Image (spheres, rainbow, N blue to C red):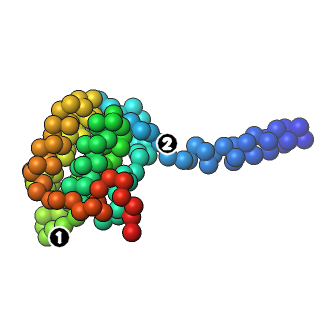
């Protein structure tokens, strides 16, 4: 009887504790970009950029640049990943679906992410500045960091 009571108490404690273990860890720092900054198989949840849902890649690049200036590498990583995703939203023939996009702006974003992964923030900032110049996309006021989604 005593063993059943202890077993029940242990299972109850496990059941209560499991949801906490299942939550995604959160972090303000960049991580899991490359081997240099990967310390866990579980990537933490990064801060979400304060941009509208349809923000342009240029707006995400601006947000990444601002985040790096404030030493918020996790926010910069998330903004760069979202800029890259926006650029990769395109129609692709099925025969080319497994081919990496060789667009220079996509490559610059990847280089900036790798620089952040190696803690080379100055180099990442330079790459983002070049990407902003190359993007040629002028962000609308709704795309600017701090804008509220409509």
Toward which corner of the image does residue 103 lie, by quadrant? bottom left
Mark 2, residue position: 25
Q: Residue at x 38, y 36 (%)?
A: 29
Q: Residue at x 33, y 33 (%)?
A: 71
Res. 79 visible in picture = yes
Residue 127 position, x and y percent, is 15, 40
Q: Which mark is residue 81?
A: none
Toward which corner of the image does residue 122 lie, by quadrant? top left
User: Relative to residue 119, is residue 10 drawn left or right?
Assistant: right
Q: Residue at x 82, y 38 (%)?
A: 6
Quick one: quadrant of the N terminus? top right
The Cα atoms of the two marked residues, 1 and 2, are separated by: 34 Å
Q: Secondary structure at mark 2?
A: loop
Residue 70 position, x and y percent, is 33, 36
Res. 73 visible in picture = no
State the residue in front, 99 or 37. 37
Mark 1, residue position: 91
Q: Residues within 10 Å of mark 1 (few under 14, many from 20)?
A: few
Q: Residue at x 35, y 64 (%)?
A: 53
**In the rendered view, would you say 143 is above or below 6?**
below
User: Relative to residue 2, is residue 101 drawn left or right?
Assistant: left
Residue 39 position, x and y percent, is 39, 31
Q: Are marks 1 and 2 in contact (CB under 8 Å)?
A: no
**In the rendered view, would you say 58 is above or below 64?**
below
Q: Secondary structure at mark 1?
A: loop
Toward which corner of the image does residue 112 lie, by quadrant? top left
Q: Residues within 10 Å of mark 2 (few under 14, many from 20)?
A: few
């Amino acid at each position: 009887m005593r063993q059943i009571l202890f077993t029940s108490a242990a299972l109850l404690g496990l059941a209560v504790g499991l949801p906490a273990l299942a939550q995604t860890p959160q972090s303000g720092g960049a991580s899991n970009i490359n081997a240099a900054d990967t310390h866990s198989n579980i990537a933490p949840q990064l801060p979400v950029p304060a941009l509208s849902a349809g923000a342009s890649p240029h707006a995400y690049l601006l947000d990444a640049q601002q985040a790096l200036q404030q030493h918020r590498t996790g926010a910069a990583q998330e903004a760069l990943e979202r800029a890259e995703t926006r650029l990769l939203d395109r129609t692709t023939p099925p025969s080319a679906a497994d081919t990496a996009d060789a667009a220079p702006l996509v490559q610059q974003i990847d280089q900036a992410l790798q620089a952040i992964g190696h803690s080379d923030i100055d180099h990442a900032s330079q790459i983002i500045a070049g990407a902003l110049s190359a993007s040629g996309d002028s962000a609308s006021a709704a795309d600017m960091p701090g804008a509220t989604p409509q």
